[in-house]
Amino acid sequence: MIVVTGATGNLGKATIDSLLSKGVSPEHIIALVRDETKSTELRSKGLQIKLGDYQDHESLLSAFKGADKLLLVSSSSDISKRFEQHKNAIDAAREAGVGHVIYTSFDLIDLRQSIMGEEVRYHAYTGDYLKQTGIAYTLMNNTMYADMIPFLIGKDILNNGISIPAKDGKTPFLPIKEMAEANAVVLIDPGHENKEYTIAAETAFSFAEITNMISDITGKALIYHQPNEQSYREQLIQDGVSKDDAAYIARFSGAIAGGEFDTGKSDVKQLIGRSPVNLKNYLTTVYGIFK
């Protein structure tokens, strides 16, 4: 039995779809949700639906009982609460007798020394705690989603150009779908216990290079603007992003500018049996309609 947390979120939902496509019977998948009203689509696929909250130990213990493997998708709650929530979920998994916990961590050159501070450091705390429990673990150290690129570079790029203060920093962006497939492989196949994997593309690209890719795809020469962080935050807020989220995204761009995502590692081919999708091919699926 496999439990997938965050089952209504992007990565959790995509992982479930990958498990089903690989032949896992839906009745062997437990989708953990906080809000049952959002589980209609999952229920229609024949999955078991269980309510659980990372802050409610008893709900987690009930949901995890009988499970062999758990995909612990990192919390999206307030950052100050995330490690304690993860610790609570890991404790519940151990108490319920789960044999293998797979945690979706984050891939940076150094989580503990990142300019993003506690906004990413909790991933290191979670990984350390999981290793100390005695449960078999796998850490899936994820890079940034390629799916985030349109959100990061601003609206109406054909007229405004691409705008992000990322300098020449490079990121090995990977689509959520391929991250999910890597999760599914680890959940299904044996031999991944007590290992860490870098879930990233084989090549990292700067936003200058991404600008050139999108220019080729759309047939329109775009300009790569590098505003200062304050101007970038203000633009995000103008585009409808909350003040706190805009500040958070701006700090991500600072980490990109500092080269923190360019780790030069990728284990995706080893896991899914093929090289990750080429970034330009992915961007063509997004921007090809504008040609």
Image (tube, helix red, strand yellow):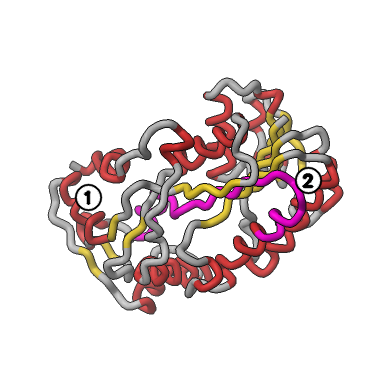
Q: Which amino acid, by three-letter code, is at mark 2?
A: Ala
Residue under pointer 2: 93
Q: Secondary structure at mark 2?
A: helix
Q: Secondary structure at mark 1?
A: helix
Residue 151 is covered by the magenta coloring: yes
Question: On the picture, is 96 further left or further right than 204?
Answer: right
Total numbered badges shown on the rendered structure: 2
Labelled disc at residue 246: none
Q: Which amino acid, by three-letter code, is at mark 1?
A: Ile
**Quadrant location of the N terminus?**
top right
**Quadrant location of the C terminus?**
top left
Q: Residue at x 46, y 33 (%)?
A: 272
Residue under pointer 1: 214
> Dividing the picture into quarters, in which one does residue 88 lie?
bottom right
> Dividing the picture into quarters, in which one does residue 161 lie?
bottom left
Residue 162 is covered by the magenta coloring: no
For the residue pair 111 and 193, the one nearer the viewer reads as 193
- Tell me the crowding category of disc 2: few under 14, some 14 to 19, or many 20 or more residues within 10 angstroms, Cα based: many
Give the image location of residue 181, x and y in percent.
50, 35
Question: How much space separates mark 1 and mark 2, taking CA atoms?
Answer: 44 Å
Is residue 171 among what the camera can see? yes
Is residue 286 among what the camera can see? no
- Is 39 drawn above or below residue 157 in the view shown? above
Give the image location of residue 283, x and y in percent.
29, 44
Q: Residue at x 76, y 34 (%)?
A: 67
Give the mark nearer the N terminus: 1 vs 2. Answer: 2
- Is 261 drawn above or below residue 244 in the view shown? above
Give the image location of residue 153, x and y in percent.
32, 60
Q: Residue at x 81, y 53 (%)?
A: 56
- Is 48 drawn above or below residue 221 in the view shown? above
- Tell me the crowding category of disc 1: few under 14, some 14 to 19, or many 20 or more residues within 10 angstroms, Cα based: many
Residue range of the region highlighted in magenta in the rendering: 128-152
